[in-house]
Image (tube, rainbow, N blue to C red):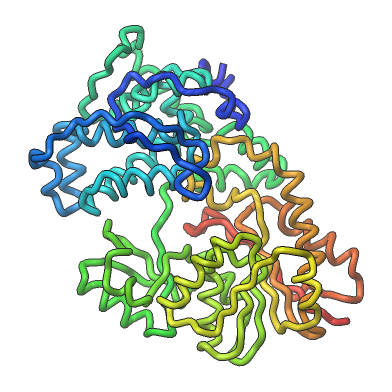
Amino acid sequence: MAFEKPQQNKNFKKSSFNSHKKDSSSSKTFSKKDRTFTKGEHSENRSSRPFKRTFTDRKPIREESKFRKLEEHTQYVKRKGFSEFQLRLVNSILEDVLVMHNSLDRAYAFWFNKVKIDPVEQGFLIRQINYMFSRLSLFAYVSNLKRPSDFERHVGRLVFSFCAFKDWPLPELEGEEGFDRRGLKKRLAEANDFPLLHDGCPIWLDELGKSELKGKWDEQRVALGLESKRFIRTNTLKGTKEELAHLLSEEGIVTKPVAGVPTALEVTSNSALFRTKCFKEGRFEQQDAGSQLIGAFVEAMPGMRVIDACAGSGGKTLQLAACMQGKGSIIAMDTQAWKLDDLKKRAKRAGAFNIEPRLIDSTKVIKRMADSADRVLIDAPCSGTGVVRRMPDSKWRDGRENLNEIRTVQSDILERYSKMVKVGGLVIYSTCSIMPSENERQVENFLNHHQGEYELVEDKQIMPSSGFDGFYMAKLKRIK
């Protein structure tokens, strides 16, 4: 059983999550109004659910909706517990992920678009839900949930156990007469004494980390269980970091500089960044400080021809454009057209007009660009083990199932895409993984197959224990 005893704690498996359909949760939730989602909207896995209206047209003003500071929300919940409104919203989001099998990001996007609340309250609830997912195994153990199917019937227990963990007033649990409330403190103490439960680390990730990182793993396991920090990157096409910090402070956003990352600011206030005038003017992008180090590592200069071969929605592409001061050209490539469409919008807002999106719809696209670039950035698909604290729901799916396939894809992309660089140019291979099999070993294998053609100039590993997300980057020079 998955959470019966600490020493027998096992991870959730992807197949287990997907093999069960939902049973109604015993806790009250919001529901969705007569709508079926299709691929390309919010999720291909959503099914329509009738919307039971719980509010009249003239909604009463909620006491907790008046607060404009994070501390006010925290103190309110410490005294009174989650309000009925907040409980329904939290349970709806949990059910969306655990029952409907949607990602947490998509659940947030859907519900906070549907249920309009103040940004500070929204940020407060996101912080609590993220914490629940960061230690899902702990709360499952406390809740006596032993199988993935248990989650689908008892979502409310997780919130109950979370409140007990926080020493907040406990919510009502409807239809949970068999749940042992008297054993909560004992089970909380047991869970806190067991490192994997305390750190919110699934068995599969612990086994993989020990296998690949050996004695270095324990420190990273602890770090991956901590709350992620909030970083933004200054768009130097539109001003300096100091100017940005000043303008943000005028909008109530508190920031501080980040040592070793010239373009980064850490946001220390719980604020709605994307509603600010600074964001609408394209003065910054939300980007982890470690990720910003990869952009600088490329050494893109004004006037160069640079290829971002796995551009996605363009976070690093926009950084490269700023490094190049808008001069030269950047070819932003990806296999997903919708990501490139998103990049176009972001580039326009950022004032980055030297970017050319290009869809990879056949192998010919890569072949035609052989020997053409001064720099080629290959931000390869990976397991994402370096960023699990930023996406806490992702670690509860066994990532080992697809790891061999991921390594094969990485090797193939590095082999084919590296040919786009000129002789004398640089290929930068990067991932958001901390596992050597996806990083150093991939580079070693590539160099062994291309002796005398490429040489390793430098590589770096950023670990989660640094306070940033985990990343790897290697700089390869083409010499023949």
User: Viewer-proximal residue, 349 or 402?
Assistant: 349
Q: Residue at x 19, y 36 (%)?
A: 77
| Quadrant location of the C terminus in the rendered image | bottom right
Q: Is residue 226 above or below residue 248?
A: above
**Residue furthest out toward the top:** 178
Q: Could you tell me how many numbered marks the image carries? A: 0
Q: Residue at x 16, y 41 (%)?
A: 75
* Residue 249 position within the rendered picture, expressed as x and y whole percent measured from the top left: 23, 72
Q: Is residue 76 left or right of residue 210?
A: left
Q: Is residue 441 left or right of residue 394?
A: right
* Residue 69 position within the rendered picture, expressed as x and y whole percent measured from the top left: 17, 53
Q: Is residue 179 above or below residue 121?
A: above
* Residue 266 position within the rendered picture, expressed as x and y whole percent measured from the top left: 37, 65
Quadrant hosting residue 215: top right
Q: Is residue 328 above or below residue 290?
A: below
User: Viewer-proximal residue, 73 or 206?
Assistant: 73
The answer, for residue 67, to whether it is visible in the render is: yes
The answer, for residue 460, to whether it is visible in the render is: no
* Residue 56 position within the rendered picture, expressed as x and y whole percent measured from the top left: 12, 35
| Quadrant location of the N terminus in the rendered image | top right
Quadrant hosting residue 294: bottom right
Quadrant hosting residue 355: bottom right
